[in-house]
Image: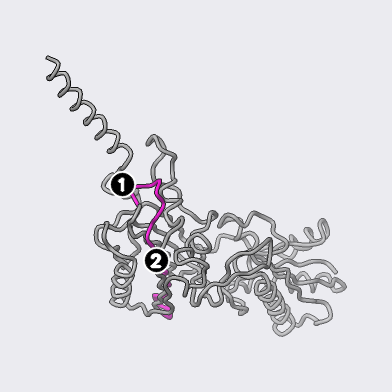
Amino acid sequence: MDQLHTVNGAVGVCLVAMLVALAAAPTQAQIANLAGSRDPAGIKRYEGSIVIGYSFGKFDEFTFLTGPVKRSTLGTGPRVVPTKSERAEGQRTRIVYVVPEGRSPLEVLRNYEQELGRGGFQTVYRCRGIECGTDGAGALGDQYLYTMETRLSQTPAAGSGRPPGQISAYAFSSAKDQHLLTARRGPAPGDAWVSVYAATATFELHKETLGHTIVLVDVVERAPMEAKMVTVDAATMARDIAATGHVALYGILFDTDKTDIKPESAATIAEIAALLKQQPTVKLYVVGHTDNVGVYDYNVGLSQRRAAAVVQELTAKHGVAPARLKPAGSGPVAPVASNDTDAGRAKNRRVELVKQ
């Protein structure tokens, strides 16, 4: 009886230990693909990969690295900014994958490069480790590509008994062995940009990803924005300027990082000309505004050049006297909404008419 009790006790202890171990060390198999997620059109995932983070937008923007990043002290404090980049607007997909165990970031990236090549993409930039400009061999995610403001927080799901979203949110925390690929297919039609970032996860609290290669894929397929804004007419401009001294216009459009005014801006430009004709003594500042994405000095210069392009359009094509208009660029320093959301950044990108 005593011997049987001892054996049963030992079995019980082992069984409890096994259950504890299983509970403490979940496997990748316990992570399921996020409901509603899908691979970008024409871009396959690495075999066996599981989606733990996903977002899709019909019209958004993303800054693709075409050179290493560097430390910058502009703004509120030290941060990482690109030395070379290309900002693209259009249909955007962001996905975080967990790759099966035993596959290195280099192997995964090579596979993506070959697959993208078959799809008509050409490599624009590649880097690995500290070549990417970070102060650590796996820090590009935390420092630039996957910052706190841009992380996806979907795995595990709410109600799982664990803090929701932490596995996907901290997928690249303290990562190592980073590799980045930027590729482009284009020019139009079919213009698209892809960023593939792969690194090894080392975050010990999440056994589902520990030691696995994690892949961050960002894709922007260039597409025109749906025209949803109503053109502000001359009478409304006059009323707002009389009431507040300025009016914000969202109908003057530019391609990303360009100063050429897009053809669909013609109606708004014509209404500005009508306003100036109706009020021949009015003088205006034409002020360009941007969001806070990118380097401060560049954004200020871009907003100044865009404002100058509007003035040039009004004087050259609508006969407005140059003395009545003065261009100015505010860059990101006068936001009307939070730059932490896509909708807020869209509101901050505008041209304003300010009474002199």
Q: Residues within 10 Å of mark 2 (few under 14, many from 20)?
A: some
Relative to 21, say whether 34 is above or below. below
Whole-percent x, y for residue 163 in the image = 44, 39
> Which quadrant of the structure image shows residue 239?
bottom right
Amino acid residing under circle 2 = Asp
Whole-percent x, y for residue 192 in the image = 42, 73
Which residue is at the far bottom?
316
Determine the main secondary structure of the stretch shown in magenta: loop
Q: For residue 249, which numbered disc appears in the image?
A: none
Q: Residue at x 32, y 57 (%)?
A: 212
Amino acid residing under circle 1 = Ile
Q: How is the image coloured?
A: one colour
In the image, residue 199 lies in the stretch drawn in magenta: yes
Q: Residues within 10 Å of mark 1 (few under 14, many from 20)?
A: some
Which residue is at the far front?
2
Marks 1/2: CA distance?
23 Å
Q: Residue at x 28, y 71 (%)?
A: 111
Whole-percent x, y for residue 17 in the image = 26, 33
Please report contact status of discs 1 and 2: CB closer than 8 Å, yes or no. no
Which residue is denoted by mark 2 in the rendering? 177
Indicate the secondary structure of the residue bearing disc 1: loop
Compared across the picture, whether 222 is left or right of 46 comes to: right
Foreground label between 1 and 2: 2
Compared across the picture, whether 130 is left or right of 313 comes to: left
Indicate the secondary structure of the residue bearing disc 2: strand
Which residue is denoted by mark 1 in the rendering? 31
Q: Residue at x 51, y 56 (%)?
A: 150
Q: Which contiguous range is marked in magenta? A: 186-209
Compared across the picture, whether 333 is left or right of 8 comes to: right
Relative to 350, say whether 243 is above or below. above
Whole-percent x, y for residue 23 in the image = 31, 36
